[in-house]
Image (cartoon, rainbow, N blue to C red):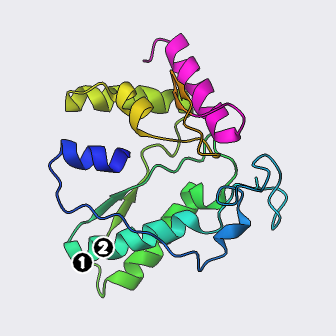
């Protein structure tokens, strides 16, 4: 939803939506298996939540880098965060930096070109992320908080119940983090 809205806002007409085949073992994640308990530990590693999708961000960023290379784009933005995340190894700063190095080695034959993976949320908590939404919205001439509330979904169960903090129910880690961050930002006057 948000990608389409941002593309319209900036008159980007060549946005592509790509459907990724389930050839990787994505079905081992409760994020994609509606019969699994979203709050249980992951079957491959009990230190991770069952919502972990092995290599998801690595795959997305690799595809984005390939497209960026062809189009001459040198910066990719991703919303990964290691401050208040669920322990996903592919959300760590160390992982993103290692991937960026590997992608540049694999996409360029010299050091003249490179792609930078920007992670503006990496060290922010959710309250600070809401504050950033407000700030960026102001720069764009829109209500950034309203935009995020109305056009993004964090709920791991895909629930579309509307709330002041966005869509979802507080019955899964992602929605709980989002709702608590919204409330903290509001309480502290950040939004």
Residue 154 at x, y percent in the picture: 55, 42
Q: Residue at x 25, y 27 (%)?
A: 142
Q: Residue at x 28, y 70 (%)?
A: 68
**Is residue 100 inside the magenta stretch?**
no
Above or below, 95 relative to 166: below
Residue 3 at x, y percent in the picture: 33, 50
**Is residue 184 inside the magenta stretch?**
yes
Residue 165 at x, y percent in the picture: 52, 25
Above or below, 64 relative to 82: below
Q: Is residue 100 visible?
A: no
| Front in this rendered view, residue 144 or 27 | 27
Cβ atoms at labels 1 and 2 below 8 Å apart: yes
Q: CA distance from mark 1 to mark 2?
A: 5 Å
Above or below, 13 relative to 126: below
- Residue count near mark 1 (Cα–Cα under 10 Å), binned few <14, some 14–19, many ≥20: few
Q: Is residue 111 visible?
A: yes
* Quadrant of the rendering where the C terminus is positioned: top left
- Residue count near mark 2 (Cα–Cα under 10 Å), binned few <14, some 14–19, many ≥20: few
Residue of label 1: 70
Is disc 2 placed on a helix, strand or loop? helix
Residue 94 at x, y percent in the picture: 57, 60
Q: How many marks?
A: 2
Which region is colored magenta?
168-191
Above or below, 72 relative to 94: below
| Front in this rendered view, residue 170 or 144 | 170
Residue of label 2: 67
Main SS, magenta region, reads helix
Is disc 1 placed on a helix, strand or loop? helix
């Amino acid at each position: 939803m948000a990608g389409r809205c941002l593309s319209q806002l900036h008159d980007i007409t060549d946005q592509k939506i790509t459907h990724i085949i389930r050839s990787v073992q994505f079905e081992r994640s409760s994020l994609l298996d509606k019969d699994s308990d979203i709050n249980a530990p992951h079957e491959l590693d009990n230190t991770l939540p069952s919502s972990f999708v092995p290599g998801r961000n690595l795959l997305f960023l690799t595809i984005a880098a390939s497209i960026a290379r062809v189009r001459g784009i040198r910066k990719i933005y991703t919303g990964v965060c290691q401050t208040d995340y669920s322990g996903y190894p592919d959300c760590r700063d160390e992982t993103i930096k290692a991937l960026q190095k590997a992608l540049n080695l694999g996409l360029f034959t010299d050091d003249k070109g490179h792609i930078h993976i920007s992670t503006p949320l990496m060290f922010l908590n959710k309250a600070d992320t809401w504050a950033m939404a407000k700030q960026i919205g102001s720069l764009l001439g829109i209500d950034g908080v309203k935009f995020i509330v109305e056009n993004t979904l964090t709920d791991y169960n895909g629930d579309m119940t509307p709330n002041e903090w966005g869509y979802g129910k507080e019955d899964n880690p992602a929605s709980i983090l989002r709702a608590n961050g919204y409330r903290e930002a509001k309480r502290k006057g950040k939004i």
